[in-house]
C-alpha cells in the first residue's frame, strides 16, 4: 500500500512524466534541443509543460526567448483562445465567411471550397499562403477546415471576409520571409499536417512539394540544389521516406550552412546529421 502511495505521488509531482519522456520520447527531446539550441534541462522543462507537444513547446520557447533578449525578429505572440462573446460583430462576420465556402451536413470547408476561395483570393490552391492559413487555424486535416479551426485562424489573421483575407496575403508572405520564428513554426507544423493517416514519415514526393513551397521563403541559398538532389534520389530508386528527424534538422542545417562556401567546413566523418544531408554535402563539395 505504501508503495502504491509513493507511485501516486511520483506521478502527480510530474517526475513520472519526466521519466517517461526521457525513456519513450527521447527523439522529441533531441528535436527540441536541435531546433532551439537549448540545453537538455531546458528542453525537458518546456516539453513537460506541454505534455510532450513539440510544436507548443517551441511556441512557448520562442515567445519567452523573444521577451528575454528583445530580439530584432518579433517573437510569435502566445495564442489566445477565441472567446465567442468577444467582438460579436466580427465573430458573426467570420461565421458568415465560413458558411459562404463550407458544405456538407457537418459543415466544413473542403477542397472544392478551397478551390472557390482561392479563385476569389486570386491565388493558386497550392500556394504557400494556404499552408500558413492552415498553421494559424491549427488545422488537423489537409484540405479541410472545421468551423472552430476557421474561426481561430481568421481571428489570428484579423480577417472576417474574403476581402480582408485577400489583404492579408502580402503580410503572410512577408512574415514567412522575414520572421525566422514564424517560418520555423509554420515549417515544423507542416510535417505533421501533411502526413497520411497513420503514417509516421512523409513520402519523398510530398516532402519535395512542401520544400518547393516553403524553402524559397527561408533565405537559404541552396534550396534549389537541395530539392534537385532529393528529386534525383527518387529517380535513382532511392525512394526514402522523410523522417521527422530529417525534417526538423533541416532548419538547423540551413542556419549552420547557409551557402555552398560554408559547406566546405562540413565534416562527414564526425557528422551527426541525417544521412541524406551528409550525401547532399558531399555532392556540393565534389562539384567544386
Image: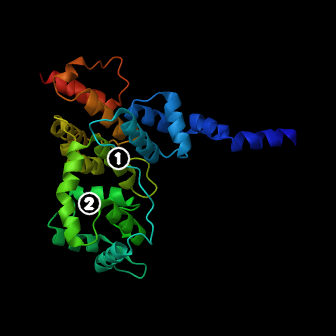
- Considering only order in the chain, which callout, 1 or 2, is on the residue closer to the N terminus? 1
In the image, residue 196 sits, relative to residue 76, either above or below, namely: below
Report the side of 267 relative to 264 (left or right). right
Q: Badge 2: few (under 14), some or many (20 or more) residues near its Cα, within 10 Å?
A: some
Residue 193 falls in image quadrant: bottom left
Say which element carries label 1. Answer: loop
Report the side of 104 relative to 117 (left or right). right
Give the residue at x 39% y 56%: 196
Spot occupied by residue 76 in the image (x, y as percentages of width and height): 35, 47
Q: Which residue lies furthest to the left in this view?
A: 288
Spot occupied by residue 237 in the image (x, y as percentages of width and height): 27, 42
* Residue designated by label 2: 130
Give the residue at x 70% y 44%: 12
Q: Residue furthest bottom?
A: 105
Spot occupied by residue 210 in the image (x, y as percentages of width and height): 26, 50
Q: In which quarter of the image is the C terminus?
A: top left
In the image, residue 61 sits, relative to residue 108, either above or below, namely: above
Report the side of 224 relative to 244 (left or right). left
Say the numbered circle drawn on residue 76. Answer: 1
Give the residue at x 44% y 71%: 84
Q: Can residue 154 be seen in this view?
A: yes
Q: Is residue 26 visible?
A: no
Give the residue at x 36% y 32%: 69
Amino acid at each position: 500500500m505504501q508503495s502504491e502511495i509513493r507511485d501516486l505521488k511520483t506521478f502527480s509531482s510530474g517526475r513520472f512524466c519526466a521519466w517517461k519522456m526521457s525513456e519513450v520520447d527521447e527523439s522529441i527531446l533531441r528535436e527540441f534541443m536541435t531546433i532551439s539550441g537549448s540545453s537538455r534541462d531546458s528542453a525537458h522543462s518546456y516539453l513537460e509543460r506541454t505534455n510532450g507537444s513539440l510544436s507548443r513547446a517551441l511556441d512557448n520557447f520562442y515567445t519567452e526567448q523573444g521577451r528575454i533578449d528583445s530580439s530584432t525578429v518579433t517573437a510569435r505572440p502566445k495564442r489566445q483562445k477565441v472567446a465567442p462573446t468577444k467582438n460579436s460583430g466580427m465573430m458573426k462576420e467570420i461565421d458568415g465567411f465560413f458558411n459562404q465556402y463550407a458544405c456538407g451536413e457537418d459543415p466544413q470547408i473542403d477542397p472544392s471550397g478551397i478551390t472557390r476561395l482561392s479563385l476569389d483570393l486570386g491565388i493558386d490552391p497550392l500556394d504557400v499562403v494556404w499552408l500558413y492559413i492552415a498553421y494559424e487555424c491549427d488545422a488537423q486535416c489537409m484540405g479541410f477546415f472545421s468551423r472552430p479551426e476557421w474561426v481561430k485562424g481568421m481571428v489570428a489573421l484579423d480577417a472576417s471576409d474574403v476581402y480582408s483575407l485577400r489583404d492579408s496575403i502580402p503580410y503572410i508572405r512577408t512574415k514567412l520571409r522575414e520572421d525566422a520564428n514564424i517560418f520555423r513554426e509554420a515549417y515544423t507544423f507542416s510535417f505533421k499536417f501533411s502526413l497520411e493517416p497513420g503514417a509516421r514519415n512523409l513520402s519523398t514526393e510530398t516532402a519535395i512539394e512542401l520544400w518547393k513551397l516553403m524553402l524559397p521563403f527561408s533565405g537559404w541559398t541552396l534550396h534549389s540544389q537541395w530539392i534537385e538532389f532529393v528529386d534525383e534520389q527518387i529517380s535513382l530508386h532511392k525512394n526514402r521516406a522523410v523522417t521527422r528527424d530529417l525534417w526538423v534538422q533541416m532548419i538547423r542545417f540551413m542556419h549552420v550552412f547557409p551557402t555552398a562556401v560554408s559547406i566546405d567546413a562540413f565534416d562527414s566523418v564526425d557528422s551527426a546529421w541525417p544521412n541524406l544531408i551528409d550525401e547532399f554535402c558531399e555532392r556540393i563539395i565534389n562539384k567544386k
